[in-house]
Amino acid sequence: FGSRLHILESTTSTQIEAIKLAEEGAEAGTLVISDMQTSGRGRLGRSWFSPAGKGIWMSLVLRPELPVRFMPQLTLLTGVAVCSAIRTVTGVEAGLKWPNDILIGGRKVCGILLEAATEDNKVRYCIAGIGIDVNLSEQDYPEELRSIATSLRMEAGTSVSRSKLIGAVMNELEARYLQYEKEGFAPILKEWEALSASIGKQVRSVALNQVIEGTAIGLSDSGGLMVLTEEGMNSTIFSGEVEIIQ
Ligand code: BTN
């Protein structure tokens, strides 16, 4: 992964660039990196703050031969790879919040967005977008993000090499991807649980006007978050947003 590199100074969104390349036939492993994004996009239609020179804003073209229903597993796999790379390079104990936010001390340091082009319920290609707040300092953040976001530099107390981290993320992703092809989702699921900042915590999810609140107890085989409610009921969350209450 990352052997074909497109390095940009500025773009609207690396997702859009990567989709363009994928449509033109770019091979799996093609990576688009930009120093800044003018309209970085997040999950659920949100925007993603992507200032110049301070973060890793990148999108990877993948061509998995998978039915669409396996996409959530690929999303979790990406989270595991990035979280593990962050831990290795910085020594900071980053953890995963379902489905694939990466948190340090309860604040978000990385967001992941997987978008797939599909045909007949199969994935044609998929773009894994990864945004990591690397060297931002407190003042770099707009007011509304200060209490919920953090950077690796703020947490590690020293600036972090973006190129080193990009290399580590690519290595971890490639290794997990090959493992997934050979051994399926089970080993990834175990790893996700080990890196989790959600499991054992009180969580609340609101989806389709239904509130589920309880203790997160693990991942289901297909990658949903299993929650044990106070009434002793087992529910599995498959989409939307999950808030960690305590
Ligand atoms: C989230 O909402 O948590 C996902 C954020 C994903 C941001 C990354 S930055 C690189 C890539 N390009 C984008 O426009 N978004 C993703």
Image: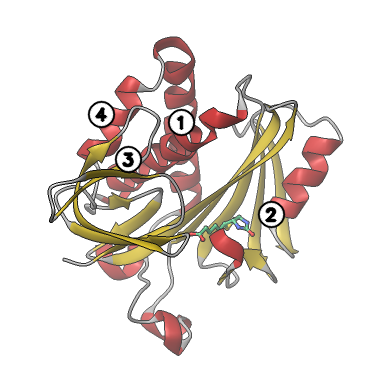
Q: Give the class, few, some or many, for how many residues have Cα within 10 Å of label 4's Cα (few <14, many ≥20).
A: few
The disc labelled 1 sits on which kind of residue?
Asn
The residue that disc 1 covers is 171
Name the amino acid, label 3. Ser
Report if the beta carbon of the residue with label 2 is closer than 8 angstroms to ligand 1: yes
* Element at label 4: helix
Q: Is residue 230 left or right of residue 186?
A: left
Q: Tell me, yes or no, if residue 42 can be seen here.
A: no
From mark 1 to mark 2, how far is it between C-alphas?
20 Å
Tag 3 and tag 4, C-beta contact below 8 Å: no
| Earlier sequence position, callout 3 versus callout 2 | 2
Structural distance between the alpha carbons of marks 1 and 3: 11 Å
Q: Is residue 76 visible?
A: yes
Residue at which label 2 appears: 14
> 8 or 220: which is nearer to us?
220
Which residue lies at the image location 61% right of the left edge and 30% below the top edge? 68
